[in-house]
Image (tube, helix red, strand yellow):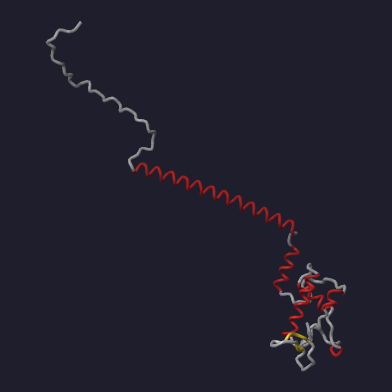
């Protein structure tokens, strides 16, 4: 915003020399950028709620032009919007204006801004986001529970198969006696020989 006229002119911007001690006067965008950035930072600290475009608007509204350039159409190719005046930008009563200020707004940002104006309010948007988050948490919990049940079933089946392959019986550990042998009724009964001793009374 500080003048950087392409034709030879008297230097007006004082800055530190690149080598040695002392200062020198110069002009051009390289020197002007440091002052403009410092002025923007000063305004931002004083007006933290303003957007970048509104900060630029304060600098533009309070910029000055030399008498020879009073009738220029701004922004001018050589002078831009003029020479910044940080004190006036801080003290003057300037409406905030558009959030983009004098800056050129890309079409993509214009579309996004229009969509945000026609969309739901922030409070409703926050409620919708919270509801969506709760739904995803519930779905995630159910999914993890199902995975746990499947894993538990696989572990149990693996243990059962391992016990059966080792000859173990996965049944109650008590031993049941075998059923009595079935006798053949047609089998010939062996009669013991008579005893030589008289039966005892």
Residue located 36% across and 37% down the image:
169
View extreme (top): residue: 201
Q: Nearer the viewer, residue 161 or 46?
A: 46
**Residue 89 spot, x, y in % from top left:** 83, 76
Picture quadrant where residue 173 is located: top left
Q: Is residue 62 left or right of residue 111?
A: right
Q: Is residue 138 left or right of residue 108?
A: left
Residue located 74% across and 87% down the image:
22
Picture quadrant where residue 157 is located: top left
Would you place residue 125 above or below residue 190 in this image?
A: below
Q: Quadrant of the C terminus?
A: top left
View extreme (bottom): residue: 8
Q: Nearer the viewer, residue 174 or 31?
A: 31
Q: Is residue 1 left or right of residue 157?
A: right
Q: Is residue 31 left or right of residue 86?
A: left
Q: Nearer the viewer, residue 77 or 25?
A: 25
Q: Nearer the viewer, residue 93 or 161?
A: 93
**Residue 129 spot, x, y in % from top left:** 68, 56
**Residue 132 spot, x, y in % from top left:** 65, 54
Q: Quadrant of the N terminus?
A: bottom right
Picture quadrant where residue 198 is located: top left
Would you place residue 98 above or below residue 199 in this image?
A: below
């Amino acid at each position: 915003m500080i003048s950087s006229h392409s034709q030879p002119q008297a230097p007006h911007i004082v800055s530190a020399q690149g080598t040695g001690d002392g200062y020198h006067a110069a002009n051009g965008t390289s020197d002007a950028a440091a002052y403009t950035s410092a002025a923007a930072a000063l305004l931002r600290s004083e007006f933290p709620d303003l957007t970048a475009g509104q900060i630029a608007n304060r600098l533009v509204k309070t910029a000055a032009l030399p008498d020879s350039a009073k009738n220029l159409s701004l922004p001018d190719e050589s002078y831009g919007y003029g020479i910044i005046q940080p004190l006036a930008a801080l003290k003057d009563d300037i409406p905030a204006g558009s959030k983009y200020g004098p800056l050129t707004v890309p079409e993509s940002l214009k579309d996004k801004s229009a969509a945000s104006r026609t969309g739901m309010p922030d409070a409703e948007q926050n409620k919708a986001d919270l509801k969506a988050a709760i739904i995803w948490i519930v779905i995630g919990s159910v999914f993890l529970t199902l995975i746990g049940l499947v894993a538990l079933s696989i572990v149990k089946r693996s243990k059962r198969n391992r016990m059966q392959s080792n000859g173990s019986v996965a049944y109650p550990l008590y031993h049941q006696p075998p059923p009595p042998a079935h006798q053949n009724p047609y089998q010939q009964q062996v009669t013991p020989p008579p005893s030589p001793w008289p039966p005892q009374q």
